[in-house]
Image (tube, rainbow, N blue to C red):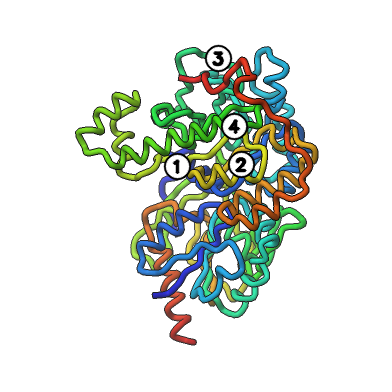
Amino acid sequence: MPIVGVLALQGAFHAHVKALSQLNVEVREVRLPHDLDGVDGVVLPGGESTTMSQLLLSSGVFDVLTQRIADGLPTMGTCAGLILLAERVLDARPDQVSCSVLDVTVRRNGYGRQINSFETDIAVTGLETPFTAVFIRAPIIEEVGSGVEILAVHNGVPVAVASQNVLAASFHPELTSDVRLHELFLHMISSASTVR
Amino acid sequence: MTSTSSNSGSMRVNRGLAEMLKGGVIMDVVTPGQAKIAEDAGACAVMALERVPADIRRDGGVARMSDVEMIEGIQASVSIPVMAKVRIGHFVEAQILQSLGVDFIDESEVLTPADEAHHIDKFNFTVPFVCGATNLGEALRRISEGACMIRSKGEAGTGNIVEAVRHLRSIIGDIRRITQADSAELFDWAKKLQAPLPLVQEVAELGWLPVPMFCAGGIATPADAALAMQLGAEAVFVGSGIFKSDDPAPRARAIVEATTHFRDASILAKVSRGLGAPMTGIAMDEINQRYAERGW
């Protein structure tokens, strides 16, 4: 059974743990570097990216995590998790860190404040029926590099993307009972282990 | 590639923001400068208000929604969510805060109540609300009015965690008991709690509230934050505890670390070192006004 780590420094990590727990994987909360030992994939949840950035540094998780993802560890990021993976982040705090493993430009809070948060049904490549996407003070994807596949678009803007080992969304699949995006991520993990 | 309905202010969208704040620290701030210190320290949100509860307690008089300009100044100074407080039942203060684009409204017993019988009908708003509770019945009544987050009331402005512990234990203890109840007993629980039966049934099924529950009221140290988390709170509010201490920035930082690593005693020891004096605090038999008794 694959082991999936969920970064549990701050944010909606419990919702990801709950979603993954339905899917025949071992789930492990990650707060310290050694929690990443032996994981086959990792999830970076929604929450406050500024808070998580600081806790990534103080816990020592940042360096280990960045290296593991750069080495090919399958990784899923949602909302703040997307920000923590992006190569270019706009409207970030100057001291904010990113693992810089996904060739996209994102703007923090690009969809506005909470009164502008919304949910909507979108089509996602690889899923037969629409997916309910919940956007909460979401980052907006402004540019996508050539090696990055766009999996879903809302109002002409990419909202879910994938590269070789990274799956990321500006919305929150963990807030619905629909686990299909988590299943896509698990496929990524199983194909990565086959390659190895 | 298509988009269908778009639904701002839905239950899922608003409870979702509460979900995003879990494992974090929401700090009371009274100036843009303090808001920056809070954000620098890793706060996941700030609560903008005119006076911290300790000063409201000291000054007396009527405590109201904060000055609009002050709230806007704080919104402009940070990129994390900004919350603000309204008086219990004062739906016009809430309308004003919503128009400012505040991210979360706290209908708070720390301010002087505006209505002695009615809380705000929170379903009338797009913006989410958090409300305080001292017991499960109160929590469920607030949820039935549309609150998307519950926090313990504790006793704000005292730097004394004892009341928050009482409230958390009361709420969580009753949740545990309800999960053991059979379906017939749930009717009796609804009556005892003075709460809607469907919500009582939902709690029995979930083994938890249908919304996140945070701790507020009296947190002054990293150990206090970790205590709240180990008791079952999902995040913490710190009011006077930071900016009434000797050295706010390191204390704020330490409370953030303690809230994340709440089960790791060696990290808690490390972050508790050399923080200077916490706020002095007040014992419960020294106060004459209990804010927790406000609300119904």
Residue B107 x %, y %: 54, 26
B55 in relation to A135, above or below:
above
Q: Nearer the viewer, mark 2 or mark 3?
A: 2
Image position, residue B235 (x, y; %): 55, 44
Instruction: Looking at the image, tell me whether mark 2 or mark 3 is earlier in sequence order.
Output: 3
**Which residue does the numbered mark 1 point to in the structure image?**
B7
Query: Secondary structure under badge 2?
Result: helix
Task: State whether residue A5 is above or below residue B259.
Answer: below
| Lower position in the chain sequence, tag 1 or tag 3 | 1
Q: Chain of mark 2?
A: B
Q: Amino acid at mark 3?
A: Ala
Task: Give the residue type that dot 1 points to.
Answer: Asn
Real-space Cα separation, disc 2 to disc 4, in angstroms: 11 Å
Q: Which amino acid, by three-letter code, is at mark 4?
A: Gly
Q: Nearer the viewer, residue B258 or A121?
A: B258
State the residue position of label 2. B224
Residue B18 vs A30, above or below: the answer is above
The label shown at residue B114 is 3
- Same chain? Circles 2 and 4: yes
Task: Locate the C terminus of chain B by quadrant.
Answer: top left
Number of the front mark, 1 or 4: 4
Q: Secondary structure at mark 1?
A: loop
Q: CA distance from mark 1 to mark 2?
A: 38 Å
Q: Earlier in the sequence, mark 1 or mark 4?
A: 1
Instruction: Report x, y in % for residue B131.
Output: 51, 30
